[in-house]
Amino acid sequence: ENQDLSKTPTSFKDLISTLPKDNGWKFCQPLYLYQGFWYNPFVLEGTILAQKNFQAQPGDIFLCNAPKTGTSWLKALTFAIATRNHFDLSSNPLLTKLPHDCVPSLEMDYFKNPTMPKPAGGLSVWATHISFSSLPKSITESKCKIIYICRDPKDTFVSLWHYLNKMRSKSHEEISLEEAFELFCNGKSPYGPYWDHVLEYWKGSLECPNQFYFLKYEDMKKDTIFHLKKIAEFVGHPFSLEEESEGVVKKIMELCSFENLSNLDVNKKGQSPHADVDGGTVDNNLYFRKGKVGDWKNFLTFEMGERMDNIMETKLSGSGLNL
Ligand code: A3P
């Protein structure tokens, strides 16, 4: 067993020893099935701690999604919206910090540093990959606003496969595309099954439409300005007519674009702490690969694409959502 849980408290060790596990992705640690979703031990511990201790404040905003569906982009856009009156766009922290270092992650940062300061701008923005049904109760009870982003599962999978293979330490074997695809199609991916993640938030959004802004990566690519304005309204910071005529919306879109962010020094050459990786850091450029819709066609066969589409169609059938 390639497991090192020595840094985790005994009660947590006891808990995860009771959970189903899977080492198919050949991570240094297996994934564990907790409340219907697969977690690596580091984020699982953070999830459980957040479930026990996190007290959402009224007005907190949560950016929720499954990994590789647009976290960095959504973090950047929301942060830029929330802080636009505090920083000149030319001195925005997004120019010198990774988007992940501007918006804290509930299960990673809260666990590591519960007193992490709130971002400037009076808005408290958090991000999480935790499934809707496993969110700390205080988030759902206090009706915090939730922005959920999802993405074509084929592009999500291709993005995930690249990311996990690149961030793996040299001492761990690569996983082939075919092996990884099989796992993903069986629901075994970090925070997966992917379709259940999407479906839970989708159903939540139908039950409480005022609490949710539910969007797709592809739609945001197609009309970024439209969704940027919608997000600003949704978080209670709509753009004024004056701002619109001064081109502030367009400037934020450009600041947060893939082209701009991926070419910044911090995102090209910087590194960030990542406790889940051997050695503890990850190259920031792993968060910026191509940023395209439909890149899956360069990696998956037609049959693989069809298989994934069929799975999604079956799983989402009757929900009113297509992906
Ligand atoms: P690809 O691997 O398909 O290029 P996450 O931020 O959830 O980890 O998702 C990563 C995916 O979002 C990657 O997709 C990455 O290139 C893309 N991405 C990162 N920043 C982006 C941006 N500003 N605009 C659009 N896509 C972005």
Image: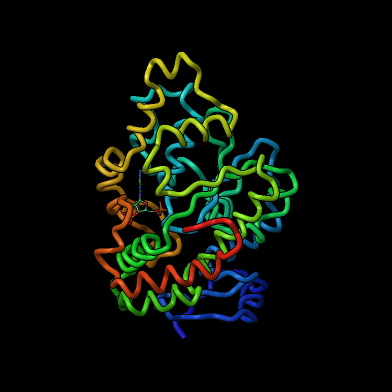
* The image quarter in which residue 219 lies: top left
Residue drawn at 56 percent across, 40 percent down: 125
Instruction: Give the residue furthest to the top.
Output: 242
Residue drawn at 45 percent across, 43 percent down: 74
How are the residues colored?
rainbow
Q: Nearer the viewer, residue 155 or 51?
A: 155
Q: Is residue 304 left or right of residue 198?
A: left
Q: Position of residue 276 (x, y in %)?
A: 45, 64
Relative vertical location of residue 131 with respect to residue 124 in this rendering, above or below: below
Q: Position of residue 133 (x, y in %)?
A: 66, 60
Instruction: Give the residue furthest to the right.
Output: 141
Q: Is residue 96 left or right of residue 219?
A: left
* The image quarter in which residue 238 lies: top right
Q: Nearer the viewer, residue 66 or 46?
A: 66
Q: Nearer the viewer, residue 134 or 104?
A: 134
Relative vertical location of residue 26 with respect to residue 316 in this rendering, above or below: below
Count how many numbered circles sit on residues in the image: 0
Residue drawn at 46 percent across, 13 percent down: 242
Q: Is residue 268 left or right of residue 113?
A: left
* The image quarter in which residue 245 lies: top left
Residue drawn at 60 percent across, 40 percent down: 61
Q: Position of residue 29 (x, y in %)?
A: 46, 75
Relative vertical location of residue 277 with respect to residue 250 in this rendering, above or below: below
Q: Position of residue 122 (x, y in %)?
A: 58, 28
